Image: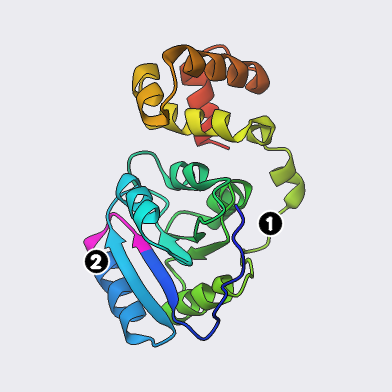
């Protein structure tokens, strides 16, 4: 995902937070509210609430958990893919960097921060990402480029992320304001591109990519 540089660098960085843990929510709310560089927009508990927040508020950078309903961090990243006004996403998680960080980068995230890092590291990462930087642990980019999901269109990726979140074709059609036949068309195309023959195979590939 891309986002233009902030037009007023003297203004506070507008930050949103999405994490399922009340303890993490409280800690990030305290950290961000105490630092004059930031304006905390809101703190929410799941991906759907976060997407609603993005729809109604201007956010520069968001700190998002990886294990978060309705799917995981990929669900949020994929729903934001292609939106010009989407915030830059920092995934903040206790999940292993070796498996999650490549997925964050492949799905359009701006940074990966482990919860084992000191809080100051996360705060400095928010500031750096707002300036247009990407921050990740060492990654083998050859593996990222081999991700089969890279062959999907934005709409196909959105449909796949909604399938992984447990939605039916009818529910996807309603949420995307398209016909069920259009959803079937996208599902058939993404099956062909991914080389799978069932919804369960496509979801398994998505969750492990």
Q: Secondary structure at mark 2?
A: helix
Depth check: 54 or 108 in front?
Answer: 54
Residue 118 in sight here: no
Percent coordinates x, y for residue 82 in the rendering:
58, 46
What residue would you read off at disc 2?
23
Percent coordinates x, y for residue 66 in the rendering:
42, 51
Vertical side of 99 occupied by 189: above or below? above
Percent coordinates x, y for residue 157 in the rendering:
55, 33
What residue would you read off at disc 1?
139
Q: How many marks?
A: 2
Q: Residue at x 47, y 11 (%)?
A: 181
Q: Would you say residue 18 sits in the magenta stretch? A: yes
Q: Secondary structure at mark 1?
A: loop
Residue 59 found in image quarter = bottom left
Q: Residue at x 50, y 28 (%)?
A: 160
Left or right: 208 as drawn, with respect to 118 = right
Residue sticking out furthest to the right: 142
Q: Which residues are magenta?
A: 17-22
Residue 158 in sight here: yes
Residue 83 badge? none
Depth check: 72 or 13 in front?
Answer: 13
Vertical side of 129 occupied by 87: above or below? above
Which is more N-terminal, label 1 or label 2? 2
From mark 2 to mark 1, how far is it between C-alphas?
Answer: 30 Å
Quadrant of image for the C terminus: top right
């Amino acid at each position: 995902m891309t986002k233009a540089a902030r037009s007023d660098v003297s203004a506070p960085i507008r930050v949103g937070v999405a994490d399922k843990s009340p303890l993490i929510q409280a800690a990030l709310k305290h950290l961000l509210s105490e630092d004059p560089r930031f304006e905390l927009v809101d703190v929410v508990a799941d991906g759907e609430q976060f997407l609603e927040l993005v729809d109604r508020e201007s956010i520069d950078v968001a700190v998002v958990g990886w294990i978060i309903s309705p799917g995981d961090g990929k669900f949020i990243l994929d729903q934001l893919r292609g939106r010009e006004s989407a915030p830059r996403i920092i995934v903040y998680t206790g999940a292993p960097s070796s498996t999650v960080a490549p997925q964050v980068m492949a799905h359009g995230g701006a940074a990966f921060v482990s919860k084992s890092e000191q809080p100051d590291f996360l705060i400095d990462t928010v500031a750096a990402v707002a300036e247009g930087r990407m921050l990740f642990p060492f990654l083998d980019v050859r593996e990222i480029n081999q991700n089969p999901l890279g062959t999907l269109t934005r709409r196909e990726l959105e449909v796949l992320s909604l399938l992984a979140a447990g939605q039916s074709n009818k529910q996807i059609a309603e949420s995307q304001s398209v016909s069920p036949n259009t959803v079937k068309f996208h599902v058939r195309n993404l099956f062909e591109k991914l080389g799978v023959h069932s919804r369960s195979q496509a979801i398994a590939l998505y969750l492990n990519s």
